[in-house]
Image: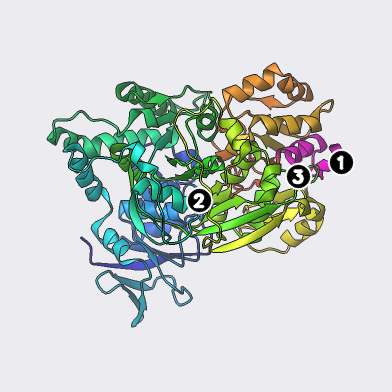
Amino acid sequence: MTNKIIGKITSIFPKDINTDDIIPAWTLQESTDRSYFEKYAFDNYDKDFVFRCKKDENNIIVAGKNFGCGSSREQAVYTLQENNIKAIIALSYPDIFYRNCLNNGLPAIIVDDITEYKIKQKIIIDFDNKIVQFDGKKYKIKNPPEDIKSFSLGGKLGKTRSHLGALLSQKQPRRLESDWQNSLKPSKNQTIVEKIISDHVGRPVFPGEKLDLPIDILFFNEVIGQPAIQDFKNKFSDVFAKYNKRVKVFDPKRIFFIPDHTVPSSSVAVSEGIDLMEKFSREQGTKCYKEGDGIEHVVLIEDGYIVPGEIVLGTDSHTDTNGALNTLAFGVGTSDATYAMSTGFIYDFEIPKTIRFNLKGKFKKGVYGKDLILYLIGKLGVDGASKKIIEFGGPGLKNISLEQRITIANMGVEMGARTAIFEPDEELEKYLKNKNKFPYKFYYPDKDCLYEKVVDIDLSSLEPCVAFPHKQGNITFVSQMDLYMKKSQKSKSMDFVPVESLKITDAFLGACTNGRYEDFIEAAKIIKGKKVHRNVNFVVIPASRKVYNRLMKDGILQIFADAGANIESSNCGPCFGKHMGVVGRGAQMISSSNRNYIGRMGSREARIFLASPVTVTAAAVAGEIVDPRKYL
């Protein structure tokens, strides 16, 4: 147990430092050895970081709001610890990164103000008295007391091992599925998520409560699958042995392994990670998809494993995609996923407050779900829904297809939300017919339930949107792009960099955000009978094998092939800068994916724009970002 940390401030960062800034995505699958990540810390953002950390053994980071936003990658925590970072002091953190810090014993200290912190200051973090001291001054630590205790104890592993022992000895059996969906009469009206959790734990719950939450579905991609399997065996095999039990996941029928990020494999390390997932799945009786079957956030929905009312964990921040199906789904890091694999629980889960989006009207021609979510991120900011649930409903919902809802839910995390969730309706019921693998129940919000705030959106007021580099919140309507480009040229921020031209060198249609059948159908309307611009490399990747085969059967892929696009098998592609279209210095790419961080899709010198599939495709034809409506 650690009662006090004494160190020196070696780095001070602004707000919204993301996990891609902390550790580049391309490194993640190359090793399960935590020390491997040390030399790549802040490789795209701060080239001197590693050098500064080598000067001291007890380094402390200070940062603004939202430190660690973005991916669920726990490697972001490892790389800090390997560089002798003993604590982070910041104004706020997104939920996934904060939990990853808790699980690994890296103190992520919350304070009210950072203006008086300076480089080389000696800092004392006193857990017993819950204060930070420097220059003879004392400042209160704002973390909840139980989190401060977890930091001092080094994480939640001990609690998980104890709970697993209780489960194995049958002193504390998991709740039966039939017990999870009870008829409850809470004292106050509830949101959708509050109702789902209440039915799972057997009592009414409300925001702010912390509890150990039973889950229904857990899935892994090949980025996290390998280290999670290794940790599962290393950390829990002795507990199973103690009770003379075989090492076994909590429910083989509800755990899935999905190689999707880097398939076909780009390295020996990636291949060996996929091999391990396949072997482990055979041993455990879980389902492991084949390479090329598709992206995790697509195939489980397609195959009926995601149903309303479930609680779903995935080792990717875009697990919130599944919320389009009236499901509580969110991303977790390696440790939370490993613990859940053993017991079927996520521990010390705090029930979030909910922001409600009431939708009315319908989209005009050329406007889609991607434009709506980009608009909302621009309106609220990348931390505008931090640690909150965003709930979508209202009369306008009937005018948004299920595939468009999936796109909207996918990017909820890009405004800091814990997850997104949609009201159910006839469209969802029609989709689930004869598809669902598990029983389900629709959940609706109560009238007059308590929301953090309510935002009314008139869908007819929107037009195509574009996100400028290097942040998803740099949003402009397509009609205002020239003015926004001029605004960027005056910026001094690394998050909003100068853009000198709207010409592009690369375009990408695909990813878990916009690689579905409907996305390609709409994009095909743009490119049919035309050619990809001679200066543009246009990569298109259907998000699953089923989507690919349907598009091929219907002749849609032929339209893209005739136009000169590069069509690849189903995978995440260039979205996270690993393979199949990594961009170099001087590139300007427009992408239908969900993140445009510095260095996200290749060189840190590249510029990445985000837009809908039709806007991406129109740019691929024109050679520059244009209003797609002139092609429709």
Closer to us: 323 or 523:
323
Label 2 or label 1, whichever comes before in sequence order: 2
Judged left or right of residue 341, residue 399 is right
Label 3 or label 1, whichever comes before in sequence order: 3
Q: Dot 2, how many residues are within 10 Å of its Cα: few (below 14), some (14-19), or many (20+)?
A: many
**Residue receiving disc 1:** 630
Three-letter amino acid code at disc 3? Val
Three-letter amino acid code at disc 2? Ile
Q: Quadrant of residue 205?
A: bottom left
**Residue receiving disc 3:** 367
| Percent coordinates x, y for residue 294 in the rendering | 54, 27
Q: Do the residues labelled 2 and 1 touch (CB within 8 Å)?
A: no
Check residue 258 for magenta coloring.
no
Judged left or right of residue 624, residue 88 is left
Q: Can you see residue 499?
A: no
Task: Classify the position of the N terminus by image quarter.
Answer: bottom left
**Nearest-to-viewer mark from 2 and 3:** 2
Three-letter amino acid code at disc 1? Lys
Q: In this view, does 315 lie above or below 83?
A: above
Q: What stretch is highlighted in magenta?
A: 613-632
Q: Do the residues labelled 3 and 1 touch (CB within 8 Å)?
A: no
